[in-house]
């Protein structure tokens, strides 16, 4: 479970996050939506311990991300937007390196690396160097790295970026399987079709604040919009000036 309480973060005079609160439950897919500059990435980076908040707290399975960042990281599988691979390592070597960073026992690493390669479906290029991979191939390997230690909480920042239609469908199937196994999934996306197809709950952030947090159906009902994209626009208009 991921819990965010009164999170604030500024960069100089820019207030990126201003009192964000939400909870992402186990066995559910929670979408984090908002226009560019709304505070989504700052919130996600705080959760996977890259940034420290100015105020407020965040917890991963009850672990304070500021007080115990290393312990929190062990409970997270993070796919940041634009995450790079080590170009001179193969896909398998990239994944193996992360398995070691996460402290997997040495005797289990190779089996676990192969399992996640099979799970993501990257066997045909697992032993190629990452330099020259397509954006879709990079995303798949980055996702495999994030899942190699079997975390309970998975944070995905625009995971379908660069994927073709078939790869996107496979990714959605994988996310649903992770949810069905009881994982907590938190992901950011600009693709409303993806959000509508996957999310049990949606947190809409605008101007550094939570504008709405509810199920897709309830968000449509509360905004008076049948279309989720229209509901999203209506929600952020209540927070941001037109």
Image: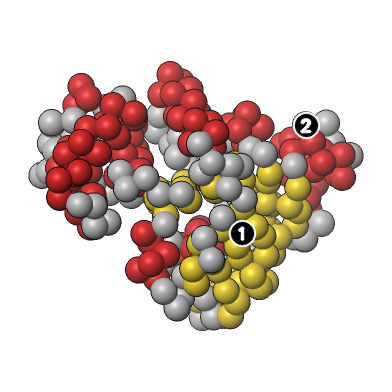
- Position of the C terminus, as image quadrant, is bottom right
Give the image location of residue 17, x and y in percent: 60, 69
Q: Which residue is mark 1?
A: 38
* Res. 168 in view: no
The answer to which image quadrant residue 126 occupies is top left
In this view, 110 is above or below 25: above
Give the image location of residue 90, x and y in percent: 14, 38
On the rendered structure, is 50 left or right of 201? left
Residue nearest the observer in this picture, 181 or 188:
181
* Residue at 25% from the left image edge and 39% from the top image edge: 112
For marks 1 and 2, the one nearer the N-term is: 1
Residue nearest the observer in this picture, 93 or 54:
93
Q: Which residue is mark 2?
A: 227
The answer to which image quadrant residue 122 occupies is top left
On the rendered structure, is 26 left or right of 174? right
In this view, 26 is above or below 198: below
In this view, 91 is above or below 102: above
Question: For the residue labelled by badge 2, is the local secondary structure a helix, a strand or a loop?
Answer: loop
- Position of the N terminus, as image quadrant, is bottom right
């Amino acid at each position: 479970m991921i819990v965010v309480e009164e999170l604030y973060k500024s960069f100089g005079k820019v207030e990126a996050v201003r009192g964000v609160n939400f909870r992402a439950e186990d066995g559910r897919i929670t979408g984090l939506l908002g226009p560019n500059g709304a505070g989504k990435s700052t919130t996600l980076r705080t959760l996977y311990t890259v940034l420290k908040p100015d105020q407020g707290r965040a917890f991963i399975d009850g672990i304070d991300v500021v007080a115990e960042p290393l312990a929190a990281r062990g409970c997270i599988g993070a796919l940041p937007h634009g995450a790079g691979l080590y170009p001179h390592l193969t896909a398998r070597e990239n994944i193996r390196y992360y398995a070691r960073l996460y402290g997997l026992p040495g005797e289990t690493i190779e089996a676990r690396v192969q399992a996640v390669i099979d799970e993501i479906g990257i066997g045909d290029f697992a032993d190629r160097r990452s330099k020259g991979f397509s954006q879709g191939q990079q995303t798949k390997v980055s996702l495999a790295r994030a899942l190699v230690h079997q975390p309970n909480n998975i944070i995905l920042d625009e995971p379908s970026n660069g994927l073709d239609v078939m790869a996107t469908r496979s990714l959605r199937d994988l996310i649903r399987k992770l949810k069905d196994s009881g994982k907590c999934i938190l992901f950011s996306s600009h693709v409303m079709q993806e959000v509508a197809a996957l999310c049990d709950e949606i947190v809409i952030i605008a101007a550094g604040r939570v504008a709405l947090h509810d199920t897709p159906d309830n968000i449509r009902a509360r905004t008076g919009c049948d279309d989720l994209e229209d509901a999203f626009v209506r929600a952020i208009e209540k927070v941001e000036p037109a």
